[in-house]
Amino acid sequence: MTDFSHLRDCTVPEANLARMVNIASCPKKRCVYIVDSGNKCIHRLGLDGWMNKWPLRGHAALQSVTQSSNLLFIGSEAGNAAKLMLISSESGECLHEFRPAWLDMDGDACMFNAVQISDSQYIVCYLTGETAGVIRVGSDGSVLQRSDDGTRVTSPHHMVADRDRFVFVADSDVNGVVMFDPSLKIIREIKLGFGMMPMHLHLDEANRRLYVGGICGKVIIVQL
């Protein structure tokens, strides 16, 4: 984090490298979780070299590690609508799952990304037709709040939230990051340039840095 020099490589045994679709880290448990959609499993790699693998239910994408060190997924099984799934970081078992009720009222709406902001609340980025927006939902699926202007987020790819509930959404159409305040109002657009097309975000709250990974293979570091 000081000079960004290469430290080490991590090998994932029996992984389908072409289908490793997402990765998240947990500082409390000192490990990383990798979704292998080819083998339909989650790889858990500890910094001490310990490894484990859990089967993955249906089609699911890892969104983030929660404050309690569990895993948050958006996933679906054959013939069923996508749900938010909270997975135990100890056993890989599903602890809770639900679908925001509002999405069922719009046939074109779907969840695209999600983060947990408290034990009972989540921020979800959704797509409906050609419009995207952000909603805050309870663990029972109730919609507690919606962004006031969904038209300015058009092609979201990843989302993170800080401890103060400010939300950052990577949007390839604006070639930057759209920032929402806790009331889900857009307060800023961070333009990146360089043909980035941002795809993934990582927030380092201790140093107030936002790491943005782009489709071009570059990483841009934004000092907040």
Image (cartoon, helix red, strand yellow):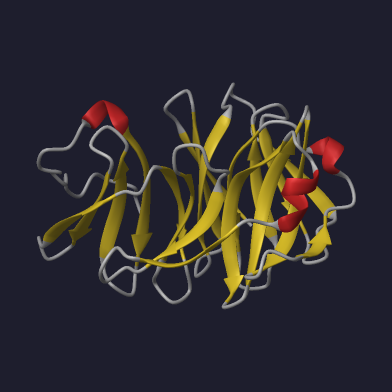
> Which residue sits at x=15%, y=44%?
12
157, above or below 149, in the image: above
In the image, farthest residue toward the front: 79
Residue 185, percent across and down?
85, 56
Please state which of residues 153 and 74 is positioned toward the viewer in this rendering: 74
Res. 1 visible in picture: no
Q: In the drawing, does residue 177 fall left or right of residue 71?
A: right
**Hey, which quadrant is residue 19 in on the image?**
top left
> Which residue sits at x=28%, y=72%?
29
Residue 125, percent across and down?
67, 48
Q: In the drawing, does residue 50 fall left or right of residue 29?
A: left
Res. 222 visible in picture: yes
The quarter of the picture where the C terminus appears is bottom right
Residue 168, percent across and down?
66, 52
Q: In the drawing, does residue 105 fall left or right of residue 52?
A: right
4, above or below 1, in the image: above
The quarter of the picture where the N terminus appears is bottom left
> Which residue sits at x=30%, y=54%?
33
> Which residue sits at x=33%, y=75%?
28
Please state which of residues 52 and 188 is positioned toward the viewer in this rendering: 52
